[in-house]
Image (cartoon, rainbow, N blue to C red):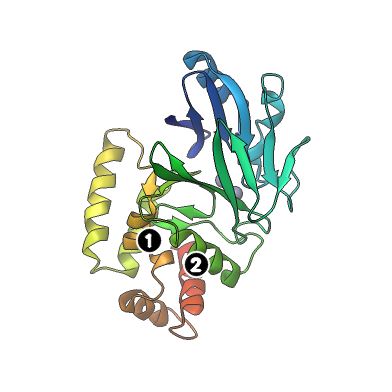
Amino acid sequence: MNLVAIPAFTDNYIWMLHDGSQALVVDPGDSAPVLGALASHELTLAGILVTHHHGDHVGGLQGLRSVLKGPVFGPARENIPGSFTPLLDGDFAELLGIRFEVIDVPGHTSGHIAYCASDVDGTPLLFCGDTLFSGGCGRLFEGTPTQMHHSLSRLAALPGNTRVCCAHEYTLANLRFARTVEPHNAALAEYEARCKALRAEGAWTLPSTIATERAVNPFLRAREPEVAASALAHGAASAAAPDVFATLREWKNTF
Ligand SMILES: [Zn+2]
Ligand SMILES: [Zn+2]
């Protein structure tokens, strides 16, 4: 299987997975770059996975329906343009012979879902939309900090080698914040240097892995003493993980 990040707008990635003849895409916010990628690799579009209802994730759906030879899967609790197969937590979406399990991850939007396949060429693969970013997480447009903290905890519990396909390239900005929260995290400093070098070459920092995110992402590290201390210094109600998380999310909004 080939995993390709199709750049769209200023910082979106439309993920494509293909086997050389059939492809699936995730969150096509724009149809033009997807049609271009399908044509250049001579691929048939076998299906679409949608994580949530925002325009930069669904704007290309209608423009792809004329070439689509399979289903559109999407979150049962959100409004997605056109007909789609609605999915709930624990449901499965099958495409290209791969079984994606649906994980409810409310917070960024109230019905946001993620798709996780346990074995794609030997390693797990996660499409998490705007819930988990490398070094950060999505803004809370519709959900509460407690919901988002719970959603991220579910993703953090996936196997460490899970490839994390986020929908935006926000990594360097996220890592700048992460370093302020946790200045003594050596793994974070190392990862930031690696990502800076990648961006300087014009390369993607994604996919990340769950193991990397557990090591560097402050939003998954609310229980670490240095993270909790920084949050307490910024007004966290207590050192309990949901309070630390809520403070970090607020703080990041104005960072
Ligand atoms: Zn979004
Ligand atoms: Zn987005």
Depth order, front residue of 106/104:
104
User: Residues under labels 2 and 1: Cα distance?
Assistant: 12 Å
Left or right, residue 37 beside residue 159 = right
The picture quadrant where one finds residue 147 is: bottom right
Q: Position of residue 244 (x, y in %)?
A: 46, 76
Q: Which residue is mark 1?
A: 217
The picture quadrant where one finds residue 144 is: bottom right
Can residue 97 be seen at all in this image of the molecule?
yes
Q: Who's the residue at 64% across and 64% down the image?
A: 143
Kindly identify the amino acid type of the residue bearing the numbered disc 2. Arg
170 shown above or below 215: above
142 shown above or below 64: below
20 shown above or below 3: above
Toward the right, the furthest residue is 83
Would you say the residues marked 2 and 1 are in contact, meaning their CB atoms lie under 8 Å apart? no
Q: Position of residue 28 (x, y in %)?
A: 60, 34
Q: Who's the residue at 65% across and 50% down the image?
A: 91
Q: Which residue is mark 2?
A: 249
Q: Position of residue 207 (x, y in %)?
A: 39, 43
Left or right, residue 123 beside residue 95 = left
Q: Who's the residue at 27% across and 33% down the image?
A: 201
Q: Position of residue 249 (x, y in %)?
A: 50, 67
The picture quadrant where one finds residue 63 is: top right
How many neighbours does mark 2 have within 10 angstroms: few (below 14), some (14-19), or many (20 or more)? many
Q: Which quarter of the figure is the N terminus placed in?
A: top left
Disc on the earlier residue, 2 or 1: 1
Kindly identify the amino acid type of the residue bearing the numbered disc 1. Asn
Instruction: Give the label, 2 or 1, closer to the camera.
Output: 1
Left or right, residue 177 beside residue 19 = left
206 shown above or below 90: above
Depth order, front residue of 103/181:
103
Beta carbon of the mark 1 residue lies under 8 A of ligand 2: no
